[in-house]
Amino acid sequence: MTTEHMVHMANQIALFFASYPREEAVAGVTDHFRKSWERRMRDQIKQYVAQGGGGLHDLVQEAVKRLD
């Protein structure tokens, strides 16, 4: 998937959880990635965050760091 599409999708997930308390929000985004994103998608976003993660919501960046 294109980087732009990945960033958009990830940020939409973060916006859904943004009104939750911080820890619940990060856990929710992390859980969504684990349950709904294929391994190749998770690998792509992990690599993107490792390269700086420009344009990603801070909840996404924190959630990606918790992925195994």
Image (cartoon, rainbow, N blue to C red):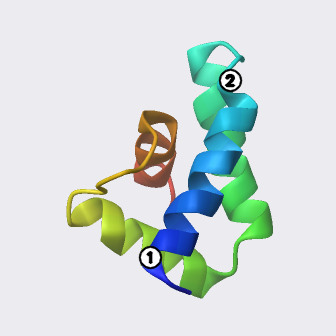
Location of residue 55 with respect to 17 vertically, above or below: below
Q: Secondary structure at mark 2?
A: helix
Q: Quadrant of residue 26?
A: top right
> Closer to the N terminus: mark 2 or mark 1?
1
Q: Quadrant of residue 50?
A: bottom left
**Label 2 belongs to which residue?**
24
Count of labels in the image: 2
Percent coordinates x, y for residue 43 in the rendering: 47, 78
The location of residue 55, given as percent across then percent down, is 36, 51
- The residue positioned 65% from the left and 25% from the top of the image is 18
Element class at badge 1? helix
Q: Where does residue 29 sit, x and y in percent of width and height?
A: 65, 44
Residue at the location (65% across, 12% down)?
Answer: 21
**Which of labels 2 and 1 is toward the front?**
1
Q: Is residue 36 left or right of residue 62?
A: right
Q: In the displayed structure, does residue 58 sit left or right of residue 53? A: right
- Packing grade of label 1 (10 A; few <14, some 14-19, many >=20) is few
Residue lying furthest top? 21
User: For the residue carrying disc 2, how many other residues have a C-alpha within 10 Å: few (<14), some (14-19), or many (20+)?
Assistant: few
* Amino acid at pointer 2: Glu
Q: Residue at x 47, y 53 (%)?
A: 64
Q: Which mark is residue 3?
A: 1
Separation of marks 2 and 1 at Cα, in angstroms? 26 Å
Coordinates of residue 12 in the picture (x, y in percent): 67, 48
Q: Please tell me which residue lies in front, 5 or 47.
A: 5
Q: Amino acid at mark 1?
A: Thr
Residue 33 in the image: above or below residue 57: below
Quadrant of the image for the N terminus? bottom right
Query: Residue 17 has which mark?
Result: none
Residue at horizontal 50%, vertical 45%? 60
Relative placement, left or right, of 31 versus 5 is: right
Query: Do the residues under discs 2 and 1 have CB atoms within 8 angstroms?
Result: no
